[in-house]
Image: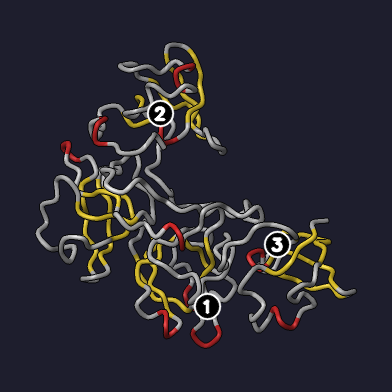
């Protein structure tokens, strides 16, 4: 029943041009199926199948370029830190080198985008490959469902609490690796979590190297949020058309699991919603269930169950930057 139009950038798609939706034409979704083109649309008396990223609701605000979850990755939207999954043109010969359907990768190299190619890192295997983003008319990748820009206030120390896949970083307070990053001011991107999330794997494009960096090991924090997060060109919200049917195998942030003993992250003691719950400064709780939604962690503390957002909690004993070293509000 949704009335839909083409998402920006899809008017020139060779396959889409064969269908009834054109600029200014409105269609209606008549059926939602499985597969790479699940949206069956009626427009101008003709039925056509479209991929999710190709459509938006009539009247819905759009980014100047197509950064909607499900949109194909091409020269218009490929950028460092973009989270992606396999797309409609995924080549059969690639098999599960991405870790399997639904696994999330991080764009780590856009130097060859003029040739229609991007480099992607697939955690947790750390496999890195180049994929078509227009080469030979093929688009092997699409933006990950539920994608939102992973940003922190510039200069914020990166810890296990706030580290996220795709976050742009630079050398921080405890940097000890010389010019392994390419020199002061170089920007890298987090592509994986290591060692119980106290270490992250970062790709440094300037020197084209991968390196592990501390985000809490022995109280050391090697990284801080980059000064240039490029927020004007990265997705600012998840599209309402984002698919919720694909299981994400890769954590977007450092995961907590059932049985973990947890405490409040610095800065959350004064959060008005958190103050209503059983966790206080010095109180330890236990994760009893991990759900979906904005407050997925169900925690038992002092005999009371309470739901918390992921950023509000850290594992007991996990090193955190001191409160004064956080430059933004919690989350």
Q: Label 1 near label 3: C-beta < 8 Å?
A: no
What is the distance, in whole Å, between disc 1 and disc 2 at their CAs? 40 Å
Where disc 2 sits, the SS reads loop
- Residue 328, image x, y percentages: 35, 38
Asked whether disc 3 touches disc 2, contact meaning CB atoms under 8 Å apart, the reply is: no
**Residue 319 in view, yes or no:** no
The image's mark for residue 91 is 1
Q: From the image, tell me which residue sits under label 3.
A: 34
Quarter of the image with the C terminus in it: top left
Q: Nearer the viewer, residue 197 or 19?
A: 19
Foreground residue among 161 and 92: 161
Q: Residue furthest bottom?
A: 136
The residue positioned 29% from the left and 54% from the top of the image is: 226
Q: Secondary structure at mark 1?
A: loop
Front residue of 238/231: it is: 231
Res 3 seen here: yes
């Amino acid at each position: 029943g949704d009335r839909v139009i083409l998402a920006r950038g899809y008017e020139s798609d060779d396959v889409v041009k064969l269908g009834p939706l054109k600029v200014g034409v409105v269609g209606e979704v008549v059926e939602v199926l499985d597969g790479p083109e699940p949206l069956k649309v009626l427009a101008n008396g003709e039925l056509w199948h479209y991929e999710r990223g190709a459509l938006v609701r009539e009247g819905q605000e759009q980014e100047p370029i197509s950064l909607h979850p499900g949109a194909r990755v091409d020269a218009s939207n490929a950028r460092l830190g973009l989270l992606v999954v396999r797309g409609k043109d995924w080549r059969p010969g690639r098999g599960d080198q991405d870790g399997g359907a639904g696994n999330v990768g991080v764009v780590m190299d856009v130097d060859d985008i003029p040739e229609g190619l991007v480099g992607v890192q697939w955690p947790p295997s750390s496999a890195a490959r180049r994929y078509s983003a227009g080469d030979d008319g093929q688009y092997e990748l699409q933006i990950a469902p539920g994608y939102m820009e992973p940003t922190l206030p510039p200069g914020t120390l990166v810890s296990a609490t706030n580290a996220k896949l795709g976050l742009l970083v630079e050398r921080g307070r405890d940097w000890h690796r010389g010019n392994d990053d390419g020199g002061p001011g170089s920007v890298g991107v987090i592509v994986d979590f290591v060692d119980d999330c106290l270490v992250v794997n970062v790709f440094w494009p300037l020197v084209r190297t991968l390196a592990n960096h501390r985000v809490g090991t022995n109280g050391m924090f090697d990284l801080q949020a980059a000064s240039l997060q490029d927020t004007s060109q990265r997705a600012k919200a998840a599209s309402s058309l984002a698919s919720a049917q694909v299981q994400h195998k890769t954590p977007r942030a450092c995961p907590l699991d059932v049985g973990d003993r947890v405490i409040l992250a610095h800065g959350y003691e004064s959060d008005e919603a958190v103050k209503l719950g059983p966790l206080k400064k010095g109180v330890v709780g236990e994760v009893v269930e991990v759900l979906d939604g904005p407050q997925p962690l169900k925690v038992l503390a002092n005999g009371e169950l309470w739901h918390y957002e992921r950023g509000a909690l850290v594992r007991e004993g996990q090193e955190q930057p001191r409160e004064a070293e956080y430059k933004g509000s919690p989350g």
